[in-house]
Every structure is written in structure tokens, then in C-alpha cells.
Amino acid sequence: MLLPGCSLLSLASVTDTLRLANEAIGTATYQCSFWSLDGKPVTTASGESLQVTGSLAALENRLGVTGAAAVAALCLVAETLPGGADHDAVQQLMRCVTRIDQRSGLLVALGTGAAWLAQAGALHGFRATLPALHAAALAAAHPDAIISGHWYEIDRNRLSCAGGSSGLDLSIQWLGQQHGEALVRQLLLHFGLERIRASTDRQLLPIAARIGHSTKLAEAVALMESNLAEPLSTEDIAGLVGVSRRQLERLFKQHLDTLPSRWYLEQRLSRARRLLQQTAQSILQIGLSCGFSSGAHFSNAYRQCFGHTPRDERSARAAAWRANTLQGPAALGTAIESNEDPT
């Protein structure tokens, strides 16, 4: 079910993964059809117009079909929240959701789809997620649902994710539960991924949302982000934005629940982690480029933050790369057919 303004990336992350799973499995296990509220083409957030099979009313009729042609899952793809004008649609959606649920089918929510499921009464006692910006509002409006800040959630027959690339994490994780680890490896290899995000990984609320209307804090954050290689002192930052050190610390504590020096260090270490995972630069080069005066200083700070050293991070990346390289698609396909681990 495509809601107006939905994300094409969210949709493709799921449909492409299912298509690749079909190829690996060797049968058309998963088949998708697209629907809209009124049966008319849906315009995505990026302006593309997507043709659909029919309307929500037609889908409701289709749900009465049993046997091989029965609908096994309903996936809501949305980037907006349901409003008062969507009352009739929500009522129809509630009936569709109920029919799917009665036959133990899957209910999947991408982006803000969880808000639509909650509005339809389908999240009572279930864990679900959506973009972090909307999590608090949805939790307050539907206290019977368990709204997390994770990238994705799989709770019995309820699947949800924050949209965008997290649809890949959700799809690959769920397919792995259905078909085994060999399929997971093949999908990771196809998408050029070393791993999927863990179900416990939390979204980061955008800085702009956390700092509110504090222009001084916004200026301080911008200064830090543009000076990761040569860090400024807290005093220098405070002076450049026109506040005292104590005022700056108060702003960080109020809006980001941390001290300026700690937040600054975490940004430098996060950048270092991305470079370790995505580039071939030496550990020392990365440490120096992120504002650390020596390899030992970098290693100690990294261990305190992430629980392991930069060398451990790089070694894990190399091991994952070797495993994916040695396990070619042909070997993985054979393992999938036998449902065995190719190693």
C-alpha cells in the first residue's frame, strides 16, 4: 500500500531484496503488487509517478480470496502521518489489517507506516518503530504500542523500520530467519554490505531537531563539525559564538544531555570509525585526520568509546571481507538449496 509522498528508496529496499531472494531460492516465492488509497498512480517524495494495481477498496475485496492467490502480507509505505482527512482510509485499512491478521499474515510498516498501523489499532502490545522524529508523538498518542527508537523491529507478525536503507536491514534479517544464514550472506554480497545493522541499533535524532531554536548551539555544533581534524578548545568555541564556557556547557546539557568536549570527541570517533570501515587509510592516518595527537591516544579513546581498539575494528572488517570473497554466489546458492551453512 503506497501512501502519497512515500519514499521510493524505502519501497525499492524491500522489493529488490525479495526479487534477489527469489533468484537465490530458485522459485518465485515472493510476489508483490502495488495499491493506493484511490487506485490512482502515487507520486513519491522524489516526484516519480508509480502505477498501481488498484484501490484500497479493491484490495479489501481481494483479501476475501483464499488459496494460492491469497494475500499473505500487507506492507504500508509512508512518509507522512495519518491525519483527520484520512479517517475513511483508516477505517478501510483497519478492515484489511484485521483480515490479514486473522490468517496470521505479515503486517509490515516502512517509514511512518507504523503510525498508520497504530491508527488502525494493529499495534496493541507490539513493538514497532518509525523515523525517530515522530517516535515520541506516536508513543504518546498510542500508549498501548511499544514504540522504539531502533532502526527496525520484528515482533511476531509485525515488521517495521524507519524507512530508507533500513528497509534492507529489515528485509535481509527477516529473510535470514526464513531461509538461513547462507541467503543473508548472498544478499550482503550483492548489496556490497559487510553486515546489516543489529535490531538493537538506535537511530540518531537529527541535530537540528535536538537543538531546537538555539542559534548559539547550532553555531557551536557547526564549528565542531567543520574542525574535526584540528579540534578547537571549549573556550575557543564559546568565544567564537559569543557565549561564556559555562553558558555553552549549559546549552549542550539542556539540548544534547552531554558536555561540549564529550560531544566533540564522539563526533571525531564516529568519523574515525567510518573511515576504518570504508577506507584503506592506515590507522595512524585516520587517527591524525580526526584530531588525535598519536596512535596511542587514538587507540585509548577508541577503546573507551566502542569497547575495542581501531586495530580490532579493521581486523573484523578484513575477516568479513575475506569470508564474503571466499563464499561466491555459486557456493552460496548450493548452500541455500540444502539449507546448510556453506562453511
Image: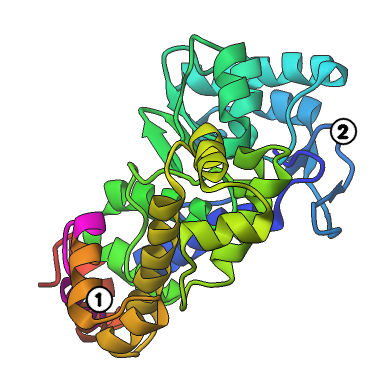
Q: Quadrant of residue 194?
A: bottom left
Q: Which quadrant would the C terminus be assigned to in this image?
A: bottom left
Looking at the rendered structure, which numbered label has been put on residue 317? 1
Tell me which label, 1 or 2, sits earlier in the chain: 2
Looking at the rendered structure, which numbered label has been put on residue 186? none
**Label 1 sits on what residue type?**
Arg
Q: Which residue is situated farthest in the top direction here?
A: 144
Residue 190, horizontal then vertical, whole percent: 42, 75
Q: Residue at x 48, y 57 (%)?
A: 234
Q: Is residue 312 magenta?
A: yes
Which residue is identified by label 2?
38
Residue 96, horizontal then vertical, whole percent: 64, 21
Q: In the rendered structure, which segment of residues is drawn in magenta?
A: 304-321
Q: Is residue 226 magenta?
A: no
Question: Is any atom of residue 305 visible in this view?
Answer: yes
In the depicted structure, whether residue 281 falls above or below residue 156: below
Left or right side of 81 for 337: left
Q: Of 211 and 56, which appears nearest the observer? A: 211
Residue 30, horizontal then vertical, whole percent: 49, 52
Disc 2 is placed on an element classified as loop
* Image marks 1 and 2: residues in contact by CB distance under 8 Å: no
Nearer the camera: disc 1 or disc 2:
1
Report, in whole angstroms, how far the alpha carbon at label 1 lies from the one at label 2: 47 Å
Q: Of 337 and 234, which appears nearest the observer? A: 234
Q: Which quadrant would the N terminus be assigned to in this image?
A: top right
Q: Residue at x 50, y 52 (%)?
A: 166
Disc 1 is placed on an element classified as helix
Q: Residue at x 65, y 61 (%)?
A: 240
**Label 2 sits on what residue type?**
Asp
Residue 99, horizontal then vertical, whole percent: 57, 18
Q: Residues within 10 Å of mark 2 (few under 14, many from 20)?
A: some
